[in-house]
Amino acid sequence: MRELTVLGIETSCDETAAAVVRGRAPGPGTILSNIVFSQLDAHRPYGGVVPEIAARAHVERLDGIVEEALAEAGTALKDLDVIAATAGPGLIGGVMVGLTTAKALALAAGKPFVGVNHLEAHALTARLCQGCAFPFLLLLISGGHCQLLGVEGVGRFRRYGTTIDDAVGEAFDKTAKLLGLPYPGGPNIEKCALDGDPRRFVLPRPMRGRPGADFSFSGLKTAVRQIVREENPDAADVAASFQAAVVDVLNDRASAAMDMFTRDFPSTEFSGSGPDGPGPDFVLAGGVASNGAIRSALTALGNAKGFKTKIPPPGLCTDNAAMVAWAGVERGQLGLFDGLGMSPKARWPLAAP
Ligand code: KG4
Ligand code: ZN
């Protein structure tokens, strides 16, 4: 299959981003440019993302960021094979900005258009970065999602587990708020935890050992709230104890999903050779996968269970447009284009339960 050069646009939350990526499946691809403007400063006073402010900031910034991405890549619109943008799920006002911009560019330049599922973009990022073959096991951990999926191909997902309440990123963000740490919570919990004692507080490990591979995080958050209310504790000790509990839960649930995946796809199918050795890939994706403690614990788990753990670099775990452009490469190669009438979607699950 021939290489495709794709412009990707991402505006589904609080990053305004555009990137140009070139490549072919199964990767790795080449990131020619990757511009991310984080709206953190605009949202920080509110302690979270304000949808209306996000949408306005996307409108103000996106044109310039697309221009910058094309210039840095040394690519003109006419050189592109595909124009791709996140079409959901996400904050609908923001999604509309990116989607409409991409459609207008596609129409003006006479290029095919792909409306990308933001979760599929996260899911395929390890193929962009390291290259990995289908099927693989995916742990998708972000601000709005916490899922274990078998990824059989583009648009083909098998769900092993999902959260029955909060997403793991949400748990990080809410715990940070309880501890008075600034927004965004995840990275600040990680930093704070470095100075703390992870054994200082005994926190619950929800769902650990249960059949299946579902998650729950609301009990953990409630336990933190109680400690903060009753003990006026050292924030670093709470952050470290919380992060240790999350690591334990992710490990246990991922381990269960590995067993399910191995039943579905026996290891004889993965006879790979070379430095990688045999065995299926275990991929992490989403903003929470930029957490160092989680990265090292799950890499060790993968090794112990005969999986090859592949995690994109931290900057490609959090929201970016290179992953959207890459999803455009994968879909473009399969001829999976979308019409300019495509609607933005606030909700767009990857797999039915
Ligand atoms: O994938 P992402 O950038 O946006 C969504 O699609 O949701 O993920 C954002 C989430 C936030 O909840 C943020 O607190 C969390 O990822 N996060 C982290 C870290 N960096 C970002 N959580 C834990 N440790 C981190 N280093
Ligand atoms: Zn995301």
Image (tube, rainbow, N blue to C red):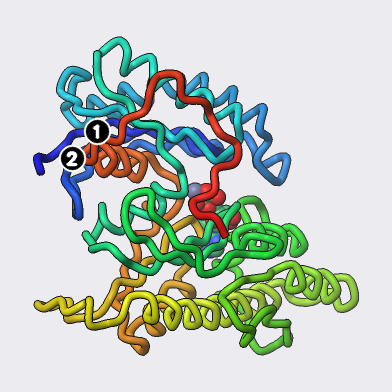
Q: On the picture, is 242 further left or further right than 20?
A: right
Residue 22: which numbered mark, if any?
Answer: 2
| Gap between marks 1 and 2 measured at Cα | 6 Å
* Residue in the picture at 32% in, 43% down: 327
- What is the crowding at mark 2: few (fewer than 14 residues within 10 Å), some, or many (at least 20)? many
- Image location of residue 189, percent across then percent down: 61, 65
**Relative to 184, is 268 above or below?**
below
Q: Which residue is mark 1?
A: 6
Residue 303: which numbered mark, if any?
Answer: none
- Image location of residue 19, percent across then percent down: 31, 35
**Relative to 290, is 199 above or below?**
below
Secondary structure of the residue carrying numbered label 2:
strand
Secondary structure of the residue carrying numbered label 1:
strand
Tell me the kind of residue under disc 2.
Arg
- Image location of residue 264, percent across then percent down: 38, 75
Q: Are marks 1 and 2 in contact (CB under 8 Å)?
A: yes
Q: Earlier in the sequence, mark 1 or mark 2?
A: 1
**Relative to 288, is 268 above or below?**
below
Q: On the picture, is 248 further left or further right than 99?
A: right
Q: On the picture, is 81 further left or further right than 155?
A: left
* Residue in the picture at 17% in, 76% down: 276
Residue 187 in sight: no
